Amino acid sequence: MPALVVLGAQWGDEGKGKATDQLGTSADYVVKFNGGNNAGHTVVVGGEKFPLHLLPSGILSEGCTPVIGNGVVVDLPVLFQEIEELESRGRSAAGLKISANAHVITPYTRTLDTLSERTLGERKIGTTGRGIGPTYADKISRIGIRIQDLFDESILHQKVASALEQKNRLLISYGEEPFDADDVTAELLSYAERVRPMMCDVTLEINNALDEGKIVLFEGGQATMLDIDHGTYPYVTSSNPTAGGACTGTGVGPTRIDRVIGVAKAYITRVGEGPFPTELFGDEGEWLREAGHEYGVTTGRPRRCGWYDAPIARYASRVNGLTDLVITKLDVLGDLEKIPVCVAYEIEGKRVEEVPASQTDFHHAKPIYEYREGWQSDISQCRTWEELPEAARAYIEYLEEISNCRISVIGVGPEREQSIVRHPLV
């Protein structure tokens, strides 16, 4: 039985939540392997919208065990609030499991996140200010707080006090109030009993599940072009949302992964700062934003919008070893007579077929477009490949050819059932 990785193939907000939710109906486990509450998925079930941030999308699938892996950074008050909101709507989070090795977002890492953005000025990254980056920085600096630390008061206090020795000096230098180690420790300890039933050895749990032939779905937050190593650095997230992150963020070896599924919109969007070759401005960009309802789930920020970028799709396919692509929001393009697709870039007068290795070159890349015929009709009720208009099928076949990956599923609306399956994924 397969182990599947689902991840974003662009700059995020591609519709991974819906894809994961659909696959989750067949999965025994859905495991979130990176990120924190700096990103969100919106899953629509029976006309109801469920915005999810820390909780894996599999939380909405009956009989599926949702898991938060060690690669995730956890803001516990946010997690508890999300659980409460879900339960108030008749859904249960009783089966949720959290890795004992997952790192905890603290009050001081939240403050340091907003301070960092403020001091960067025009060079700001565009973070959500939720403490994600500083928590990962503490993890790498080996001064982070993990879930398991909440159950040893003396160790927890020692770690908090040690971290605050350096952080309080920085906060004071910028005119901020320092944190008290006793207060922070007390706050973190107050979460311990509530999180205790959720804590487990995720590595053992998931590997045992795979040994038993169960279906495990690994869910990535953010997306390929926001990867700390492979994205548009420094305008990236602080973790690895690429396929390798599924292994390091859960403790499952790469030889156990059967399929890697990338999710991409039929166009492309981005939130925050950084290069974006196909970005649209003015009325054209506003039309696409409104047609696709492109506003952030977590922040409400308007997303930057542009046309499909084939070099990015090929890059995502290569970096992740994609076996399949899911194309979402095809229905948004239904009114267009002609659909532009970026097939290459012009950089300093030369045609470049792939995403350049140099960030400076990528900043200066200008899109080279080819134009495809639109279908100018509503396809939201289509449920089979044959029901799609000929021009829509031709557009998908064209994207498949220039993206170097087969397109297995096509989204034609936000609802769980508004999808067309060309090649089954499970």
Image: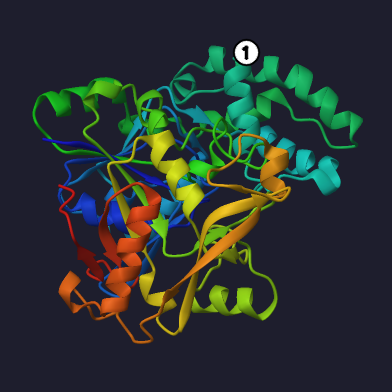
Q: Which residue is the site of mark 1?
A: 158
Residue at 49% x, 23% y is 146
Q: Position of residue 90 (x, y in %)?
A: 27, 63
Residue at 48% x, 16% y is 152
* Whether residue 219 is situated above or below residue 172 in the rendered picture: below
Where, by quadrant of the figure, is residue 355 drawn?
top right
Q: Position of residue 280 (x, y in %)?
A: 64, 68
Residue at 39% x, 51% y is 403
Identity of the residue furthest to the front in this view: 350
Q: Is residue 106 visible?
A: yes
Where, by quadrant of the figure, is residue 414 drawn?
bottom left
Residue 417 or 85: which is nearer the viewer? 417
Q: Secondary structure at mark 1?
A: helix
Q: Residues within 10 Å of mark 1 (few under 14, many from 20)?
A: some
* Whether residue 157 is situated above or below residue 86 in the rendered picture: above
Q: The N terminus appears in which quarter of the rendering?
A: top left
* Whether residue 79 is situated above or below residue 204 in the rendered picture: below
Q: Horizontally, is 36 left or right of 46 in the view?
A: right
Q: Position of residue 170 (x, y in %)?
A: 83, 27
Q: Horizontally, is 417 left or right of 68 in the view?
A: left
Q: Horizontally, is 170 left or right of 114 in the view?
A: right
Looking at the rendered structure, the number of numbered marks drawn on it comes to 1
Q: Position of residue 334 (x, y in %)?
A: 40, 81
Q: Is residue 185 visible?
A: no
Q: How is the image coloured?
A: rainbow
The amino acid marked with disc number 1 is: Gln
Residue 12 or 404: which is nearer the viewer? 404
